Image: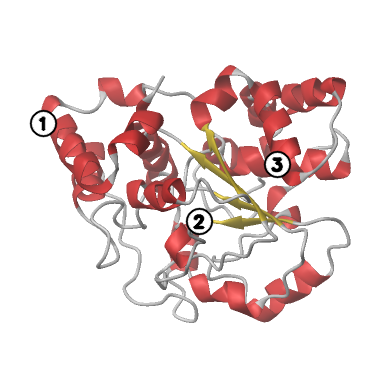
Amino acid sequence: MTKLPTKTRTYQNHTLDSERWFNIDRRADDIIVATPYKCGTTWTQAIVLHLIFQDLQQRNIDDHSFWVDKTMPPITELRAKLSAQNHRRVLKSHLPLNGFAWRPEDRILVVARDPRDVFMSMWNHYSKYTEVAYAGHNNPQTCIGAPLPRCPDDIREFWAMWINKGWFDWESEGYPWWSNMHHVQTWWDGRDTENIMLLHYNDMLADLPGQIARIAAHVGIDCTPTMRADIADKTNFKSMKRDAEQISADPYGVFEGGAKTFINKGTNGRWKSVLTDDDLVAFDETAARVLSADCRDWLERN
């Protein structure tokens, strides 16, 4: 018998507050996109919204699929926004399973990726932060604990702290955010739970219509082969990049370059020209410590 997930950790920092899940009204048919950061979260949200609405309209993700465990907006504002949604909801989480308020009725999608590719995408994200971004994360009204530090100027300096240090006492990588590998491992350990489905970023790149079919089946939405093909065409990277301002607008100027910085390249393997042999030794040591062998094999497959 599969052991059901249990919340054993509280995640609170400059960006996360896991306890917000206990302060919203949840519905029996909620769909949860619960990815590690920089693993195709916005991509998956866009796909699910097309499935829910059964159309090809590009929607602003921030207005249609709310990140519940983000410290902003104030919880009263989030509650009102969620209550106003009359359609089936798709909610976002960046929490590991051991910090998530799991319910059997949710339909949960977890997308993961080779950690080295995650790092490269996170570098693009973090290194392009503006003063607006730091002010938002470090707002004294919402920031819990230490503030988010400035991104180093050197990518390898960022690598050294990201691969060797955790933000929380029980994590040992992912600083100054939260874990990537530990995050995946918690969901990997729960993968046999009926309402949790794992997807691999590489599979979405290689066969997007097939992965859309898997997603549709998991969340219980009928989707014809024609609709799957149309959604795949609308959500491939070229289309997402072209429609970045519609999908993930940046009206406040969080990123240098705006929405097209946030939706960056969508490619893998860029780490091969950046990380040194010593960097990869550090990666191997951390992966061996944090990941089970089968989870690591799954993450690193091409």
Residue 118 vertical placement versus 18 (above, below): above
Tell me where residue 291 appears, x and y as whole percent.
29, 43
190 shown above or below 246: below
Label whose residue precedes the other's in the sequence (2 or 1): 2
Q: Which residue lies under the disc numbered 1?
A: 278
Amino acid type, callout 1: Asp
Q: Is residue 265 something one can see in this rendering?
A: no
Query: Which of the numbered marks, if any, corresponds to residue 94?
Result: 2
Q: Position of residue 98 (x, y in %)?
A: 43, 63
What amino acid is at disc 3?
Answer: His
Q: Residue 110's spot in the image, x, y percent? A: 55, 45
The residue under label 3 is: 218
Choose the circle earlier in sequence order: 3 or 1: 3
Q: In whole angstroms, how far apart are the C-alphas of marks 2 and 1?
A: 29 Å
Q: Is mark 2 on a helix, strand or loop?
A: loop
Q: Give the alpha-carbon distance from disc 3 to disc 1, as whole Å.
A: 41 Å
Q: How far apart are marks 2 and 3 (CA)?
A: 20 Å
Q: In this view, does 224 lie to the left or right of 41?
A: right
Q: Can residue 72 be seen in this view?
A: yes
- Observer-side mark, 2 or 1, equals 2
Q: Residue at x 62, y 25 (%)?
A: 237
Residue drawn at the location 44% of the way across and 34% of the way down: 113
Earlier in the chain: of badge 2 and badge 3, it is 2
Determine the secondary structure under disc 3. Answer: helix
What is the residue that sits farthest to the front in this orientation? 1
User: Which of these two is toward me, 113 or 37?
Assistant: 113
